[in-house]
Amino acid sequence: MPSQPPAPPVKVSGAANDMAQGPSHAQWAEIVQQIGAEIAGPLSGALERIHNLMVTGQIDRQGLRALRESVAHAREAGMMGQQLARLASGRIKLARERVHLTPLLRSVLAHRSRETQARGIQIRQVLKPVEVYADGSLIFGLLNALMDWALTSTHSSVDLRLDLTPWPTKARLVCRFAHRSMDMLDDARSTPAPATLNSLAWRLLEQTALTMGVLPLREDESSITVLTLEFPQTVGDESSAPVAPPPVVEKEPEHLPSTNSKPLAGSHLLIITPRRDLRVQIQDAVRHMGLIIDVVNDMDEATQFCLEGLPHGVIFESAQRNPAFDSLRRDLLREVPEFSFIEVLDHEHLTQLSTATSDRIARVSRSHLTDAMPSVLLFELSRGM
């Protein structure tokens, strides 16, 4: 990557850094109010279009797309609200695991590559090898929240730098982008920062970081935003270790992740089946896990769905195994080698993890969905963390 010009001087945004000790009751009340606003806003637009449809009996392609986007935005806000409620509950048990941060970040970027390409956003990265002690599932959520926020806020490329600070050694992830389009730079000094910088995506990123003990230091200049995430415990830094640290859990592919409440909350799952009863059964089996779930009828629809962005895993019924499935699977594995596929079989079958099958596809019998699917998902989706 060519060298970048030095970043302009930035000033600290007080709004972004006033909760280093966690939000007060009043600040949580503001967050709840924001959740309501970000759900109600797009739903109001959707209801208006539905009303017009009922009156006229017609809707054009552009209106249909706008209706779908409004509903999708409301759903995303609702899911972020659920994740924020989880963080606010105080019931999360933090694990202390040795996490290879660099390959994990690259895995997240690979999952988001189709989305970034569809948006026309370039991700420029300089990532040094870094290991930290952190909760594996929460750090995965933190990196995805970072991408959600940056991709919706940027008007430029997104620059990511992962390195180590001088003594005392700390892992540091820096995200930098322009929060205004280039043609507005002349007016930037006299106008406030865009509202997207303090959206629910930012709230989720900020609260996830604070829950982990990572201070999210955000600096907003007239046109540039720089976020620095400094991890408190870096592998190799003896000064960062607690006085009496709990045993370190080395995460190997065969191990399940930490036992957090809803450790996969916010992960994206795609279900492929035309059968409504099977869709409902799968959704009921994983409803308590806080997943974002989309459903398509067949592999052609799944291929089209994945053009705009990749889910974290796919559940498909065995009847959908065909050349279109083989083609989609090859494409996804080329981008994300650890991508998770789970096959649902109608007949009785022993539950198998991907590590126990020759084709690396996990399998669950439909009769065992309720009992087996949550555990299988927990294992399969955690392999990429």
Image: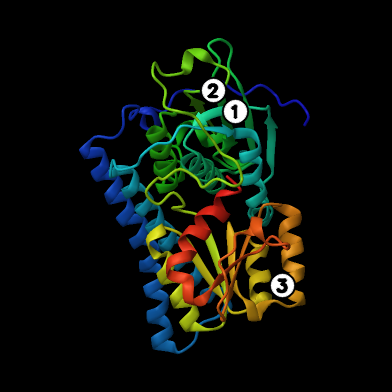
Residue at the image position 48 percent from the left and 65 percent from the top: 372
User: Which one is in front, 3 or 28?
Assistant: 28
Checking the image for residue 168, the label placed there is none
Q: Is residue 132 visible?
A: yes
| Residue shown at the point (55%, 40%) measured from the top left | 180
Real-space Cα distance between discs 2 and 3? 41 Å
Q: Quick check: 22 left or right of 183?
A: left
Amino acid type, label 2: Thr
Q: Position of residue 291 (x, y in %)?
A: 45, 59
Q: Earlier in the sequence, mark 2 or mark 1?
A: 1
The amino acid on which the numbered mark 3 sits, given as a three-letter code, is Phe
The local crowd at label 1, few if under 14, some if 14 to 19, many if 20 or more residues have their Cα within 10 Å, is many
Q: Which mark is residue 234?
A: 2
For badge 1, the amino acid type reads Glu
Q: CA distance from mark 3 to mark 1?
A: 36 Å
Assess whether mark 1 and mark 2 are in contact (beta carbons under 8 angstroms): yes
Which quarter of the rendering shows the C terminus? top right
Which quadrant holds residue 332?
A: bottom right
Q: At 21% across and 39% down in the image, what residue appears? A: 26
Left or right side of 256 for 107: right
145 lies above or below 344? above
- Distance, label 2 to label 1, CA atoms, is 6 Å
Q: Is residue 318 above or below residue 336?
A: below
Check the image and report above or below for 351 versus 246.
below
Mark 3 and mark 1 residues within 8 Å of each other at the beta carbon: no
